[in-house]
Image: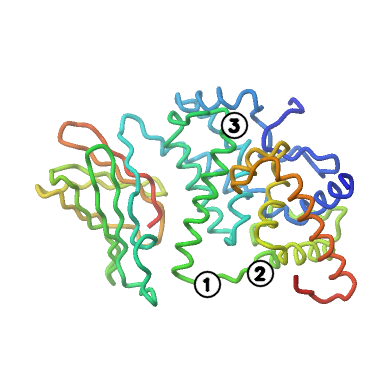
Amino acid sequence: MSAVVWATVVRPRGTRVDRAWAGRVEQSEVGDTVRRAAAGDKAAWDAIVESFSGLVWSIATSYRLGQADAAEVVQTTWLRLVENLDRLREPERLGGWLATTAGREALRLLRLRGREIVTDDEGRFDDAPSALPNPEETALGAERKRQMRRAFAKLPERCRRLLHLVIVVSPPYAEVAAALEMPIGSIGPTRARCLDRLRKLLDADGGSGSAVGC
Amino acid sequence: MGHDDDALLAELAEALRPWTEPPPEVVEAAKQSYTWRTIDAELAVLTHDSLLDDEPALVRSTSQPRFLTFEGGDLTVEVEVDSTPSGRRLLGQVVPAQAVELELRTDDGGTVSVAADGFGRFVISLPSTRQRIGLRVRLADGSDVELPPTVV
């Protein structure tokens, strides 16, 4: 596999890049793969799904949705793609299209849910989902992870969503820009500001041991 | 700054992994969604969903039916999700009124076919649990209109 992959984490300190779903389709081949899938090639479809599932899942979970709702948003997004495989104007920009579609579907479901129940803004990140994919212990201790999630949950929504996405998407962050409707040039600076806020929240949590509002 | 930020982001990535790595069954379902691919059908779009588009009632009653409108080609399909103690049904009407055949498909791969009457009206039983359905309308001239799969 080439080092150039699309919508995949390739970070200097990233813990692993060989995720099961990651990087089947290279950026230069996205357009062709979409066209093959549109023509009936199931293997091409599977490759697309494996390459972009991390992105679509992250978009869905970056909203205040539980696991089941996130899964529904993801499935709806893929169905929209199935319907539109041969209608995409720029198949090579599939990542941006998926990001936009998933965001729209997430908002739609949030509005539906808003009509039914009021969700608790915080707390979503306090409990690990039941379907944790193989929670092997890593260098990062469990307590540090909890602390990190607590701090993250206190960030403003926009920061949460941006950080959430820059974890999954490699620069230049075209999909992040599409999902957040931000100019691509402002993502870097915003990323830095949000990380700074996160750092301060972590310090506050570590210092006093109690939550400090922000 | 870049170095510190990258380190912090890597740590955050680790903590948020459940929210960035899709569960295997979600990926599997995505692969399976390819079987919903429609060939040779006009694709309708959802143009109205009473649950989203109508003025919200002060307290939403679960007994309130949900109305959905789809439009595609020259066809409008209006459906109502009707919940009764004896089960859930889809009540619908095709406009302009005409005799069509409809095929309902559920997420588990099951299909049910019904015919609309001369006024374009139809009734289809729904699964008891909320799930994704697809509806294909076959017109008298043999052409098909496919409604986007929707969770009802």
- Please report the residue visible at 31 percent of the width from the left and 40 percent of the height from the top: B146
Name the amino acid type tagged 1.
Val
- Say which mark, if any, is on residue A122: 2
User: Three-letter amino acid code at disc 3?
Assistant: Ala
Quadrant containing the C terminus of chain A in the rendered view: bottom right
Q: CA distance from mark 1 to mark 3?
A: 37 Å
Residue displayed at 42% across by 37% down: A83
Q: Which corner quadrant of the image does residue B75 belong to?
A: top left
Q: Which mark's residue is nearer the viewer, 1 or 3?
A: 1
Colour theme: rainbow
**Residue at image x 48%, y 38%?**
A81
Q: Quadrant of the N terminus of chain A?
A: top right
Check disc 2 and report its element: helix, strand or loop: loop
Residue under mark 2: which chain is it in? Answer: A
Q: Circle 1 is placed at which residue position? A: A118
Residue at x-position 39% and y-position 51%: B150
- A179 vs B142, nearest the viewer: A179
Furthest residue toward left: B118
| Quarter of the image where one finds residue A115 | bottom left
Q: Secondary structure at mark 3?
A: helix
Can you give x and y, in whole percent of width and height, for residue B3 in the image? 89, 45
Q: Nearer the viewer, residue B121 or A92?
A: A92
The residue that disc 3 covers is: A47
Q: Earlier in the sequence, mark 1 or mark 3?
A: 3
x, y percentage for residue B99? 13, 43
Tag 2: amino acid: Glu
